[in-house]
Image (cartoon, helix red, strand yellow):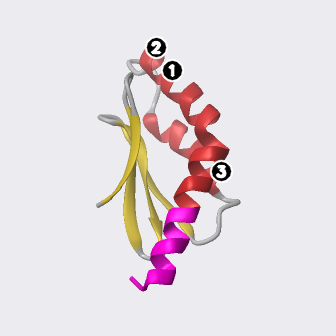
Amino acid sequence: MTPQEIELAKKTLKAILTGTSQLIGNLYSRWLEESEYEDIAEYGKVVKNALKSYECVEFIKMTKRPFGFIIKIQGVSFQFKMTIRSYSFKAI
């Protein structure tokens, strides 16, 4: 990735965290309560829809353990994961 692409990815990740933190937090809370009964793919549909407004973002999939999702920005995969204590994005 070029320095410009890295900067775009950082800005996009920050925007995603800012714009979707309440939604993701609500989904995580619900998942903690309902994971035995609900399909993680349904959560993926909600997240995918929420990410449509971000340029250059391709939703890949939801993950159960850890709870989160994988996206691509400028061809680089990133994993968002959430636990009771923290959340993070990392390149994978």
Q: Secondary structure at mark 1?
A: helix
* Residue sitting nearer the eye, 79 or 38: 79
* Residue sitting nearer the eye, 66 or 4: 4
* Residue 68 location, quadrant: top left
* Residue 90 location, quadrant: bottom left
Pointer 2 local density, CA inside 10 Å: few below 14, some 14–19, many at least 20: few
Residue 74 position within the rendered picture, expressed as x and y whole percent measured from the top left:
48, 76
Q: CA distance from mark 3 to mark 2?
A: 22 Å
- Residue named by callout 3: 49
Q: CA distance from mark 3 to mark 1?
A: 19 Å
Q: CA distance from mark 2 to mark 1?
A: 7 Å
The answer to whether residue 16 is above or below residue 46 is below
The amino acid at mark 1 is: Ser
Q: Nearer the viewer, mark 3 or mark 1?
A: 1
Rendered-image quadrant of the N terminus: bottom left
Pointer 1 local density, CA inside 10 Å: few below 14, some 14–19, many at least 20: some
Q: Which residue appears at 58% of the width and 72% of the height?
A: 56
Residue 2 position within the rendered picture, expressed as x and y whole percent measured from the top left:
42, 86
Residue 58 position within the rendered picture, expressed as x and y whole percent measured from the top left:
52, 65
Whether tag 2 and tag 1 are in contact, CB under 8 A, the answer is yes
- Residue named by callout 2: 33
**Range of residues picked out in magenta:** 1-11
Q: Nearer the viewer, mark 2 or mark 1?
A: 1
Q: Which residue appears at 44% of the width and 82% of the height?
A: 3
How many numbered circles are shown?
Answer: 3
Residue 29 is tagged as: 1
Whether tag 3 and tag 1 are in contact, CB under 8 A, the answer is no
Q: Which residue appears at 65% of the width and 62% of the height?
A: 54
